[in-house]
Structures are given as C-alpha cells and as structure tokens.
Amino acid sequence: MAIRKIREIGDPVLNKVCKPVLEVTPRIRQLIDDMLETMYEANGVGLAAPQVGILKRIVVIDVTPEGEDPLVLINPKILETDGEQTGEEGCLSVPGKFGTVTRPSYVKVSACNEQLQRFEIEGRDLLARALCHEIDHLEGHLYTEIAEGPLMTVAPPEEEEE
Ligand code: NI
C-alpha cells in the first residue's frame, strides 16, 4: 500500500465527471488499498478516486471513530433520500477549511463491491452526509459549491498545558 498525493481545490481533476469501473483489475485493487491508507493517514472519513487524480467511480468511507469499518463503493448511485440535516462539512481536498452544508439525513445507495456485485447500503446522519459528499466528488462537485455562507478556517489545536 502507498499514500497517494491528495489533489486540492483548484486542481481541474476535481471538477471532472468520473468513469464507471467495468473490471476490477489488480491496478484498481491497488488503488482502493492506497485510497484507504491515504484516507486513514489524513484522518478523513471519506475519499473519492478523483481526489488522488484517478477519474474512476470509486469511493472509500469510514465514519467510525476508530477507523475499523472501511466501506468500499464502486459505481455508487443514490437510490433514495429523506430528511434534512444542516451541519459542518470538510474535505481533504480543501485543507484547513470547513463549511455549513445541508444534506439529506437518510440515503439509500446502490454500489458494487470489489467483485463487482451490486449491494445496497443505507446511511443516516454522518454516514448519509459522507455518502452524498463522496458521490458528489464523482460528478466533479465539491461541497464548497453548496456551502451556506463563507467557509471557515479550522482553529489550530490549542497548546496543551503541562
Ligand atoms: Ni471531499
């Protein structure tokens, strides 16, 4: 596995529509492993292939606090949405910033696993937000396009007192 370079806002690769995966080749398997490693290393909860410069419809997500439940979604599509949640959202391609974004509070997604077998997954709250955010990346969209009001800057961590 290897850490890949995360592309940042302004890089045109982030604004392109990604192509479906038709076959899971060893290269694609390597890409997925690298995406997981890159996401965990950056302390992210999700990463889409275009964020590492690959225009394929692949996302990885892990919203668990310990990072023990990686989700790999190939060719995902949103089947249903319900409800609404407004909250803070960030993106590894927009470092040091966050914004207020309204998303559905529930989504049902169809996606393929690494054997290209289709399955469905339901997400609520943070997982619903992550699913919407990552699938948007595959269409070339960043949350900054739909953030309400100006982006905010992440405060630097406070120095710990001895
Ligand atoms: Ni993102």
Image (cartoon, rainbow, N blue to C red):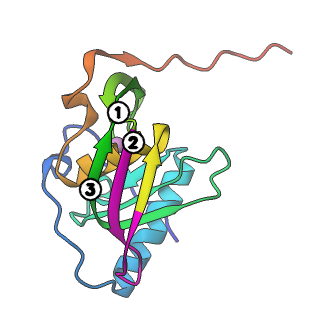
Amino acid under label 1? Answer: Gly
Can residue 92 be seen from the camera position used here?
no
- For label 1, the residue is 83
**Left or right: 12 in relation to 101:** left
Choose the circle earlier in sequence order: 3 or 2.
Answer: 3
Q: How many marks?
A: 3
Give the quarter of the figure containing the C terminus: top right
> Residue 104's spot in the image, x, y percent?
33, 36
Image quadrant of residue 92? top left
Q: Which residues are magenta?
A: 106-120
Ligand 1 visible in quadrant: top left
Q: Are marks 1 and 2 in contact (CB under 8 Å)?
A: yes
**Residues under labels 1 and 3: Cα distance?**
14 Å
Q: Residue at x 17, y 61 (%)?
A: 18
Label disc, if present, on residue 79 of the rendered structure? 3
Which residue is at the far right?
162
Q: Is residue 136 left or right of residue 126?
A: left
Q: Which residue corresponds to the image point at 48% horizontal and 70% vertical from the top-left?
A: 33
Q: Which numbered marker is on residue 106? A: 2
Of 131 and 158, which appears nearest the observer?
Answer: 131
Which residue is at 19% across, 38% downward?
A: 10
Residue 76 location (% of width, % of height):
29, 63
